[in-house]
Amino acid sequence: MPDLYEDIIYEVNDPVAVITMNRPAALNAFTTRMLAEIRHAFAAAEKDQRVVGIVITGAGKGFCPGMDMNALDSLSDGGKRSDGPKEDLAPLQASPGDTELGDNFQVTYSYLMSIRKPIIAAINGACAGLGFAFASLADIRIVERQARFSTAFSQRGLIAEHGISWTLPRLTGSGHALDLLWSARKFDGVEAKELGIAERLVETGEARGAAEDYVKNLAANCAPVSLQVIKAQVYRHLNMSLGEAMRETNTWMAASLEREDFREGVRSFIEKRPPNFARVKA
């Protein structure tokens, strides 16, 4: 599998899978190949029983500043998005995520929200445009203090792309979202934490380690099946009324009471020992 990837590095160190966008000279700007490789790697991590959570980060000084500018230049003439000569990406075709969650989670990059395992974005530098939209679809963002953000779209004559008009108001509130989308102003990791974009703020060079530690803590203390169901609940219920969400929760709660994880969770608490929950795969 590693030989398949040119624009990313994919590593698994039980219980963490790390996807590193690896075009540091371009601050890890997206190419169509990179986007296909990322999707393929998420599918691999989802199927790997060793993996409890997935970290996505960038090599060098950037996270991802959006689509490669050469690709954007080709679009300015009305062409389709491309990063150069067409290439055969068929070997990278993959369909990660739980399709049973519904069509809302199968539109372009919304598949990230249907991945059955936690996704932590370790944001170590420039995060803008499509890179920002992509990061907003991760479950949690751990951000370094010096990281720089911008929505960028309005300054390129574009609109809010690929779901950020849905995710950003839910993270920051509508007023802050409109400010960031309208002005496309730059802001740092400290302000990202203040706005609610970052769940955790860390020092320079610490994002990846903090994200891996977060996954390791989940693996040591929490049932992977519970993590999977809770993620599905949170994202599905954002699109439901309270009554619908409660009824679905009641059904899923009844199922959880029948699982071995529940018995193990109770036993480990009574016996004052770490739990031994079973791992899951797609």
Image: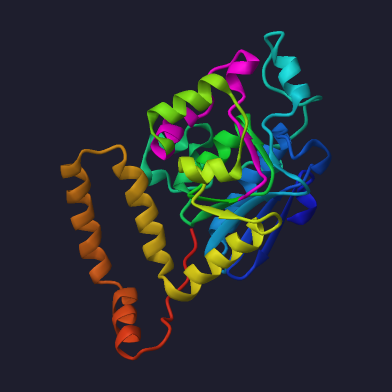
Q: Is residue 181 above or below residue 19?
A: above
- The image's colour scheme reads rainbow
Between residue 280 and residue 253, name the one nearer to us. Answer: 253
Q: Residue at x 62, y 30 (%)?
A: 186
In the displayed structure, does residue 267 sit left or right of residue 208? left
Relative to 31, residue 144 above or below:
below
Where's residue 264, x and y in %?
34, 81
Range of magenta residues: 144-171
The extreme right residue here reads 25
Q: Position of residue 216 (x, y in %)?
A: 55, 70
Relative to 264, is 125 on the left or the right? right
Quadrant placement of the N terminus? bottom right
38 to 81, vertically: above or below: below
Q: Is residue 265 left or right of residue 109?
A: left
Outermost residue, top direction?
A: 77
Residue for point 80% across, 43% down: 24
Is residue 49 visible to the viewer in this orientation of the structure? no
Q: Does the magenta segment cover residue 169?
A: yes
Residue 71 x/y as whole percent: 74, 23
At a point 63% along the width and 49% down the height, the residue shown is 145
238 and 214: which is toward the camera: 214
Camera-nearest residue between 54 and 151: 151
